[in-house]
């Protein structure tokens, strides 16, 4: 092999290695050890809920990762998905079925329905995190498992709620929390698997037997601490959604047992 050919081979190998590393980083998971926490919602006696050990993606799913999924599952393309599984805003900011421009490849995918998020995770051999799992991880700051009583932590979350278009930012730009997970706050809202597990009233929400009727968890019940206001906002947002909804600031990440 000539010197020129060797140099070209080394350059190609380096590019492929970098590409593989970036892809692997985007799908890397960490272990979240079991523990208990008192959720914002639920019974008046506020008994702790146990969360079993599980794994969670370090970052939310990106546009580049989701387009790879679409190539392998074309029925979830914007032009082919049926209304039962996604409303009209599904991937509406994309240029076409497989072209997410003008968005960044490493920005979180949004405008994705619960059905599409669930299918994506299943295709990775994973699942969506439960609401308790998500809230358990989300209550951690950089150094503490539970930072919900810290005024600065709650202030950070509430200030993010007021910032426009954070969903356009790349993943991994917010703080790394106690578990080694990024972007639980400061980037996008995220789907959970059992988003219909808390209700305030009957309506059509009482029908939990079919995926098409699923609703997100509703507003928090029996919470009294004003420091929980940041969590109130999350539950109120979840309570406004159905499984086929897709909004501009709503993304997801995967988990596994």
Image (tube, rainbow, N blue to C red):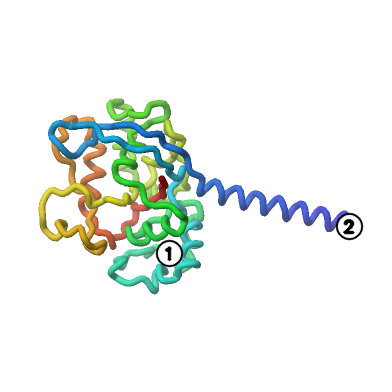
Q: Which residue is pictured at 31% across the width and 39% down the height?
A: 135
Image quarter of the C terminus: top left
Mark 2 crowdedness (10 Å alpha carbons): few <14, some 14-19, many ≥20: few
Q: Which residue is pictured at 14% across the width and 60% down the height?
A: 204
Mark drawn on residue 2: 2
Which quadrant of the structure image shows residue 227? top left
CA distance separating discs 2 and 1:
45 Å
Instruction: Tell me if residue 97 comes above or below residue 247 in the rendering.
Output: below
Residue 188 drawn at (x, y percent): 36, 47
Q: Which residue is pictured at 20% across the width and 51% down the height?
A: 239
Residue 255 drawn at (x, y percent): 41, 47
Residue 69 drawn at (x, y percent): 47, 62
Residue 101 drawn at (x, y percent): 48, 62
Q: How many marks?
A: 2
Mark drawn on residue 75: none
Which quadrant of the structure image shows residue 1? bottom right
Q: Which residue is pictured at 37% across the width and 50% down the height?
A: 165
Q: Nearer the viewer, mark 2 or mark 1?
A: 2
SS label for mark 1: loop
Front-lying residue, 5 or 180: 180
Is 181 on the left-hand or right-hand side of 42? right
Is 38 on the left-hand or right-hand side of 203? right
SS label for mark 2: loop
Asked whether disc 2 touches disc 1, contact meaning CB atoms under 8 Å apart, the reply is no
Reading the chain from its start, which is encountered first: label 2 or label 1?
A: 2
Is 242 on the left-hand or right-hand side of 123? left
Front-lying residue, 90 or 81: 81
Mark 1 crowdedness (10 Å alpha carbons): few <14, some 14-19, many ≥20: some
Front-lying residue, 101 or 247: 247
List the single residue furthest toward the bottom. Answer: 80
List the single residue furthest toward the right. Answer: 2
Mark drawn on residue 94: 1
């Amino acid at each position: 092999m000539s010197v020129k050919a060797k140099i070209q081979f080394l350059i190609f190998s380096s590019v492929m290695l970098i590409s593989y590393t970036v892809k692997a980083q985007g799908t890397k998971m960490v272990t979240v050890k079991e523990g208990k926490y008192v959720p914002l919602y639920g019974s008046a006696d506020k008994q702790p809920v146990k969360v079993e050990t599980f794994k969670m993606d370090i970052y939310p799913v990106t546009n580049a990762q989701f387009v790879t999924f679409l190539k392998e599952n074309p029925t979830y393309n914007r032009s082919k998905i049926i209304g039962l599984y996604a409303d009209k805003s599904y991937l509406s900011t994309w240029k076409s079925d497989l072209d997410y421009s003008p968005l960044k490849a490493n920005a979180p995918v949004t405008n994705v329905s619960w059905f599409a998020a669930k299918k994506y995770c299943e295709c990775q051999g994973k699942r969506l995190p439960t609401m308790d799992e998500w809230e358990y991880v989300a209550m951690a700051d950089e150094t503490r498992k539970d930072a919900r009583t810290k005024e600065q932590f709650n202030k950070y979350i509430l200030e993010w709620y007021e910032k426009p278009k954070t969903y356009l930012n790349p993943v991994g730009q917010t703080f790394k929390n106690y578990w080694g997970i990024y972007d639980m706050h400061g980037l996008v809202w995220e789907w959970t698997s059992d988003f219909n597990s808390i209700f305030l009233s009957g309506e059509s929400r009482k029908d939990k037997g079919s995926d098409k009727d699923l609703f997100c968890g509703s507003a928090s019940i029996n919470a009294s601490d004003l420091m929980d206001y940041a969590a109130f906002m999350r539950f109120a947002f979840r309570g406004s959604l159905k499984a086929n909804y897709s909004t501009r600031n709503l993304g997801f990440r995967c988990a596994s047992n």
